[in-house]
Image (tube, grey):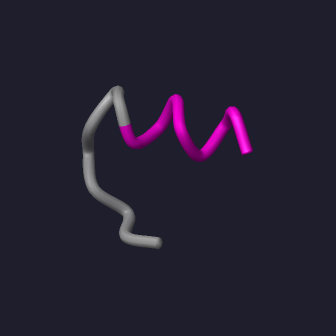
Amino acid sequence: MCTCEHSSDLQLVLGK
């Protein structure tokens, strides 16, 4: 997983 500044990525990480 990469620590990119994207709301989409953040949501995916939080969702999992």
Q: Is residue 5 left or right of residue 7?
A: left
Q: Is residue 11 left or right of residue 6?
A: right
* Residue 10 inside the magenta-drawn segment: yes
Q: Quadrant of residue 5?
A: top left
Q: Residue at x 53, y 38 (%)?
A: 12
Residue 2 vertical position relative to residue 6 in the rendered view, above or below: below
Magenta stretch, main secondary structure class: helix
Seen at 69% across and 33% down, the residue is 15
Residue 5 relative to residue 16: left or right:
left
Residue that extends furthest to the left in the rendered view of this protein? 5
Rendered location of residue 10, percent (x, y): 47, 37
- Residue at image position (67%, 37%) is 14
Measured along the vertical axis of the image, is residue 9 above or below residue 15?
below
Residue at the bottom extreme, as displayed: 1
Q: How many marks?
A: 0
User: Where, by quadrant of the figure, is residue 7 drawn?
Assistant: top left
- Tell which residue pokes out farthest to the right in this image: 16
Query: What residue is at 47 percent from the left and 72 percent from the top?
Result: 1
Front residue (pair 15, 3) = 15
Residue 12 placement, left or right of 6: right
Magenta region includes residue 14:
yes
Which range of residues does the magenta coloring cover?
A: 9-16
| Whole-percent x, y for residue 3 in the image | 38, 63
The quarter in which the C terminus is drawn is top right
In the image, residue 11 above or below residue 12: above
Where residue 4 sits in the image (x, y, percent)?
Answer: 28, 56
Q: Using the image, determine if residue 11 lies above or below residue 2.
A: above
